[in-house]
Amino acid sequence: MLIPRPSYPLLEPIARLEDVCTHGYRLVYDGAWRLDPDSLEASLTPRTRAVVLVEPNNPTGSLLSPEEFALVEGVCRERGLALIVDEVFGDIAWPPHPAPFPSRLGGRSVPTFVLGGISKPCGLPQLKLGWIVADGPEARMAELLPGLDWILDLFLSVGTPVQWALPKLLQLRHPYQAALRDRLEENLGVIEQAGTRHTGALLPYRGEGGLSAVLRVRLERGGPAAGEELAEWALRERDVYVHPAHFYELDRDDLVVVSLLTPPGTMAEALDRLVVP
């Protein structure tokens, strides 16, 4: 199974628990996040069965362009692969983007399995309700859906209380998402202002959605000791907690990931602490 890198750090261990081998294809940053098509091609083997997309991706907040998605779908079509698209962050667009993002469902030419749930759009990860929507050529889907039914039976059904509550929970997502969008807009503004105050020391990477942001940090003096993570140093020397680059297989040592759920005042203070001795 091909998975994006950088991306959600638990994809690989979850796959390993099911005896599935993962190979990574790269997302690269050049002022915006882009698919590296050469890495996608290089990751393919005769044993490849599926390509995974996370849209928006965690932590980059990026989506594939229409041309990039068409390339991935074309590879799947030529190789007889399935496409698995995790859209759990699909309602969480950064302003001024309208929410939700368009789904990849509809008229797919390859077997496509779109994942969703209430954890992110409703802010209720603890209630553990998700879904899979299947799309693709009718004959091929008729072969695959019985296997999916068996898997879902194997792992037991969703709890009855949360099923009964689902209509109300979906109604309540609207005020939650409005408050969330306000928080995202404020924190993205705080990050942009900090980047302006600390030009050259703090560079926000551009994204389109999700609950995290990638920052590049350049320290003028001091900094981590040899072999020490930037995130470890930030906690020890600045009392600032950030996610380290290696969590997500980001390929630069001067990158960190911050949560956009942080109270804006705390975010502003933490960014100033991070770069000012």
Image (cartoon, grey):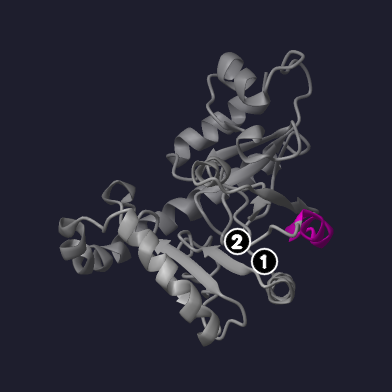
Labelled disc at residue 53? 2
Q: Report x, y in % for residue 98.
A: 51, 71
Q: Are marks 1 and 2 in contact (CB under 8 Å)?
A: yes
Q: Residue tagged by mark 1? A: 64
Question: In the rendered view, would you say 228 is above or below 1?
Answer: above
Q: Is residue 27 magenta?
A: no
Which picture quadrant has residue 273? top right
Question: In the rendered view, would you say 80 is above or below 125?
Answer: below
First of labels 1, 2 by sequence position = 2
Dot 2 alpha-carbon crowd within 10 angstroms: few under 14, some 14 to 19, many 20 or more? many
Residue in the picture at 61% in, 78% down: 110
Identified by mark 2, the residue type is: Leu
**SS at mark 1 in the image:** loop
Range of residues picked out in magenta = 31-43
Is residue 132 visible from the viewing direction of this image?
no
Question: In the rendered view, would you say 102 is above or below 172?
Answer: below
Dot 1 alpha-carbon crowd within 10 angstroms: few under 14, some 14 to 19, many 20 or more? some
